Image: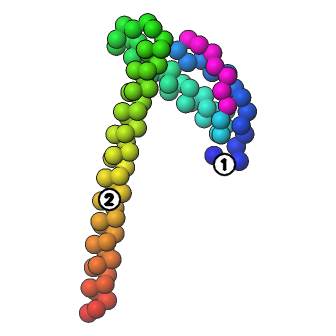
Amino acid sequence: MRGERNTPIEVEIGGQVYRIQGVGSKRYLMELASYVDRKIQEIAEATQAVDSVKLAVLAALNIADEYFRMKKDYQLLCRKALDKLERMENLLAEVGKE
């Protein structure tokens, strides 16, 4: 995303219009806003909550949970990949000794 524009755009999240800007394309920022909006809608339907602050906090907790789970999975995959790489290097070293 480096070098992409930092132009403000308007998005709707939880029935409110926000003017946001960030590093990334307009499409990317809209995708982020849409994801957050969907999370808020899911929480609203599941909890019957109407307080926008409560919905936002619950959505943030859900998104943080997803992030932490994905981060843990990523770290596990990295460890497995490094273990396999180390085993391959050891096998190659053994073959080189023969």
Q: Is disc 2 placed on a helix, strand or loop?
A: helix
Q: Give the residue pinned by disc 1.
A: 2
Residue 46 in view: yes
Counting from the top left corner in percent of width and height, residue 20 is at 66, 27
Q: Which residue does the image show at 56% across and 30% down from the upper left?
A: 31
User: Residue 65 in magenta?
Assistant: no
Q: Could you give the CA–CA distance between mark 1 and mark 2, rounded to whole angstroms?
A: 28 Å
Dot 2: within a 10 Å radius of its alpha carbon, few (fewer than 14), some, or many (20 or more) residues?
A: few
Q: Is residue 96 left or right of residue 25?
A: left
Q: Which residue does the image show at 65% across and 35% down from the upper left?
A: 22
Up/down of 21 relative to 39, above or below: below
Query: Which residue is outermost to the bottom?
Result: 98
Q: Give the residue pinned by disc 2.
A: 79
Residue 41 in view: no
Up/down of 20 relative to 12, above or below: below
Q: Which residue does the image show at 31% across and 72% down from the upper left?
A: 86
Q: Nearer the viewer, residue 21 or 37?
A: 21
